[in-house]
Amino acid sequence: MEGKRRTKRWPVVVGVVVVVVACAGAGFWAWHEQPSFCNAICHEPMDNYVDGYFEDATLMANAHEQAGTTCLDCHEAKLSEQVAEGLSWVRGDFSVDEAGNLSTVGVRADAKMCTRAGCHDFDEVAAATENWGGEPGVNPHASHQGTAIDCSNCHGAHETSYMYCNACHDYEVPDGWESPR
């Protein structure tokens, strides 16, 4: 009689294990999609980025958070990159600047990244900045340099934005931005 009872329990035990593993996997995946995942695992250097995303109203990252855009909407999670980043973190093979941000990030925000479906419409952005600062013909999004510069030359998602044009010109600088002059 005891042998029969054991044979009836194994499907229930296996079923429970499968459900628990599936729920844990789904929970982990949902957590992986959240900004808090990055700094829960890799406190240094990710704390600064996540704190800025949630708390620093001067950063473009915070404007994205306010709009409901998550980190992974811009930073596509590729398994090979995540493994390389994880190994780099474990080895301590990265450097941070005086503010605690990564010294060499390597991610540039270009028009292809920023104007993909569901994000920014470049024609609308350019139209909104026509005659910048009341100066006819001035438009920082219709630069005479064309594609030689990209969005991140000026827009700092995780750092103070920078009025790149003012390396040569003297245009109005938005509040909270830095200017080379």
Image: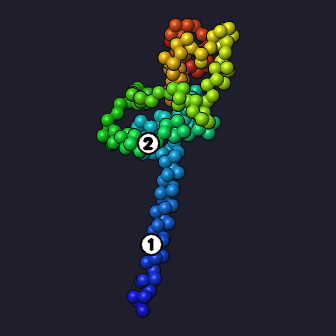
Q: Is residue 58 visible?
A: yes
User: Can you say which quadrant of the picture contains the N terminus?
Assistant: bottom left
For mark 2, does the 10 Å Cα neighbourhood hold few (<14), some (14 to 19), or many (20 or more) residues? few
> Which x, y percent locates residue 7?
42, 83
Q: Residues within 10 Å of mark 1 (few under 14, many from 20)?
A: few
Under mark 1, the amino acid is Val
Q: Amino acid at mark 2?
A: Lys
Nearest the eye: 117 or 12: 117
- Above or below residue 11? Residue 17 is above
Picture quarter containing residue 102? top left
Q: Residue at 51% x, 50% y: name it.
A: 31
Image location (x, y in percent) of residue 149: 50, 18
Q: Are marks 2 and 1 in contact (CB under 8 Å)?
A: no
Residue mark closest to the camera, 2 vs 1: 2
Q: Of 79 and 156, which appears nearest the observer? A: 79
Residue 92 is marked as: none
- Image check: 67 left or right of 94? right
- Give the total number of marks visible in the rendering: 2
Q: Which residue is mark 2?
A: 78
Cα–Cα span, label 2 and label 1: 32 Å
Q: Which of 1/77 is in front?
A: 77
Q: Earlier in the sequence, mark 2 or mark 1?
A: 1
Residue 8 horizontal side relative to residue 53, left or right: left
Residue to which mark 1 is pinned: 14
Residue at horizontal 50 percent and vertical 44 percent from the top = 36
Secondary element at image label 1: helix
| Residue 160 visible in the shown view | no
Residue 170 vertical placement versus 14 (above, below): above
Q: Secondary structure at mark 2?
A: loop
